[in-house]
Image (cartoon, rainbow, N blue to C red):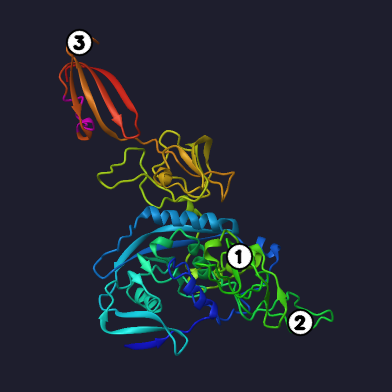
């Protein structure tokens, strides 16, 4: 057997691996020791600076990662799960002026010749190592990805074209030996197995993608006093360089849970911290509830929708500078565009794979009545362009809230004579009125009154779309009294009584 060393980021990671060996919620993103670039980041915690950032929208693309034979274990991969993840991301990040646009998914089978590697504890080296089993290949490929594989996975996906350059790429294997892993802090690639796709680890890993490091640190000092009374730098202050380099996340060396009556110091139970800590200078510090629930902490089962002001500023600064993130930025108009479907007045053919225009969940939608004030006789075959508000609006026709209800996913439709209001973006103006008054005849009937008067003695000839649209329909009729019924694709019907005389 061959072995290669795995560098442990800190003693915390070792403990975390042990504690979460069953749940696999732990994060495998390696961020300790990564420098934070001065000049890009202000290290500010000023709410006024935060308010100065414009909202930003990022594209997101998913990849199903299968085993070498196209299998996906016992897991079920579905677009509903991806939409649920997008909805969760928007609900979590929208308060911080960060939005996500679902751009679809693809998938691929992974290599059949990957060496079989085990992640084991070496008693002599006192660290985890990757142990290669001589002559054996991994039957799962990257479908059930191990800790010894994810660093090579990034190169494989990139070199084989399994990466959208203009999006955040989320790779979804059916299993993993870790909770999740971003390629690096500030990047556009993340691994999340299907079971964690809607768990707090999703928000955590995307935080890494957007430039955030873990809040834990063994060398961050307690003090937040940057300058001494005489104006000189405080030599004990290192909060803008140590740990996550964010001043308003407090010093802590990581959290652990009781598991079967065992714990490591410091620890929390039921998301409540107990115990006291000191930094490396011997100065005591306090752990607050916000430290435990912070999205970038390591108390994974306690993580909630919480970032500090400094963390949000840091993300916005990273998005506007990191090349991987800059190319993933899209415009707000994209959120008013369906992720799938086609525009018609009505009557989509499921047999032909047609769907109405469908919108991603995770926002508060109001679809309001609208009509064309410029061309009221015909309307338009496509919705108004974004920010073109030259249409009249009326009452709310139907609405959806941001709460994640999978049963609603295929109900968020943009139907005829409605415009879209997304309240998280603009709760005053509706956008993209769709008012298509052009109609196509789908079917109909020719009713002949056999007695030449309007009574029940009739002969009915049903017509398909070709028959009812035949330009010679009336010309070919015999002399007599008729009712022509036409069914249109917007759900309406027209009836016309005619007297056919000699040609």
On the image, the x and y values in percent for residue 407 come to: 41, 44
Q: Residue at x 38, y 42 (%)?
A: 381
Q: Earlier in the sequence, mark 2 or mark 3?
A: 2
Q: Which stretch appears magenta? A: 467-476
Disc 2 target residue: 234
Picture coordinates of residue 399, whole percent (x, y): 49, 40
Q: CA distance from mark 2 to mark 1?
A: 28 Å
Q: Report whether residue 410 is seen.
A: yes
Q: Residue at x 45, y 57 (%)?
A: 85
Q: Nearer the viewer, mark 1 or mark 3?
A: 1
- Quadrant of the frame with the N terminus: bottom left
- Which structural element holds mark 2? loop
Q: Foreground: 251 or 497?
A: 251
Categorize mark 2 by other alpha carbons within 10 Å: few (<14), some (14-19), many (20+). some
Give the position of the C terminus as an image quadrant: top left
Q: Which mark is residue 452?
A: 3
Left or right: 203, with 161 as reference point: right
Q: Residue furthest front?
A: 261
Extreme residue toward the right, this view:
230
């Amino acid at each position: 057997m061959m072995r290669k060393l795995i560098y442990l980021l800190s003693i915390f990671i070792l403990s975390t691996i042990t504690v979460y060996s069953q749940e696999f919620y732990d994060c495998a993103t390696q961020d300790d020791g990564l420098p934070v670039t001065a000049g890009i980041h202000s290290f500010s915690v000023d709410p006024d600076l935060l308010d100065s950032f414009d909202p930003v929208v990022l594209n997101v693309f998913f990849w199903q990662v299968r085993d070498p034979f196209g299998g996906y274990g016992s897991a079920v991969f579905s677009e509903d799960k991806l939409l649920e993840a997008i909805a969760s991301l928007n609900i979590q990040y929208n308060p911080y002026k960060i939005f996500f646009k679902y751009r679809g998914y693809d998938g691929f089978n992974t290599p059949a010749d990957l060496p079989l590697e085990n992640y084991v504890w070496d008693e002599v080296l006192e660290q985890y190592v990757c142990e290669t089993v001589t002559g054996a290949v991994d039957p799962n490929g990257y479908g059930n990805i191990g800790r010894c594989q994810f660093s090579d996975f990034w190169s494989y996906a990139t070199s084989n074209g399994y990466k959208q350059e203009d999006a955040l790429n989320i790779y979804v294997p059916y299993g993993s030996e870790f909770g999740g892993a971003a390629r690096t802090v500030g990047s556009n690639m993340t691994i999340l197995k299907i079971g964690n796709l809607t768990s707090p680890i999703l928000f955590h890993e995307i935080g890494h993608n957007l430039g955030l490091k873990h809040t834990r640190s063994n060398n961050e000092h307690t003090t937040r006093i940057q300058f001494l009374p005489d104006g000189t730098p405080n030599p004990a202050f290192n909060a803008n360089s140590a740990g996550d380099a964010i001043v308003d996340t407090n010093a802590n060396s990581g959290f652990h849970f009781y598991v079967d009556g065992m714990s490591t110091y410091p620890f929390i139970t039921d998301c409540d911290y107990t115990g006291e800590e000191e930094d490396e200078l011997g100065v005591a510090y306090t752990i607050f509830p916000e430290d435990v629930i912070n999205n970038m902490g390591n108390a994974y089962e306690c993580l909630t929708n919480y970032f500090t002001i400094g963390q949000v500023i840091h993300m916005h600064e990273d998005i506007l500078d990191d090349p991987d993130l800059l190319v993933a930025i899209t415009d707000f108009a994209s959120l008013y565009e369906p992720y799938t479907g086609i525009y018609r007045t009505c009557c989509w053919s499921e047999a032909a794979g047609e769907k109405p225009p469908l919108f991603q969940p995770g926002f508060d939608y109001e679809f309001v009545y609208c009509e064309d004030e410029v061309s009221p006789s015909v309307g338009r075959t496509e919705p108004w362009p974004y920010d073109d508000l030259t249409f009249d609006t009326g009452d709310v026709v139907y609405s959806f809230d941001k709460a994640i209800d999978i049963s609603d996913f295929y109900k968020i439709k943009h139907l005829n004579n409605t415009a879209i209001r997304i309240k998280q973006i603009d709760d005053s103006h509706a956008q993209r009125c769709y008012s298509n008054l052009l109609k196509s005849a789908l079917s109909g009937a020719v009713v002949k009154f056999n007695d030449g008067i309007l009574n029940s003695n009739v002969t009915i000839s049903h017509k398909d779309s070709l028959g009812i649209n035949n330009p010679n329909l009336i010309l070919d009729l015999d002399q007599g009294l008729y009712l022509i019924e036409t069914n249109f694709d917007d759900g309406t019907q027209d009836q016309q009584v005619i007297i056919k005389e000699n040609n």
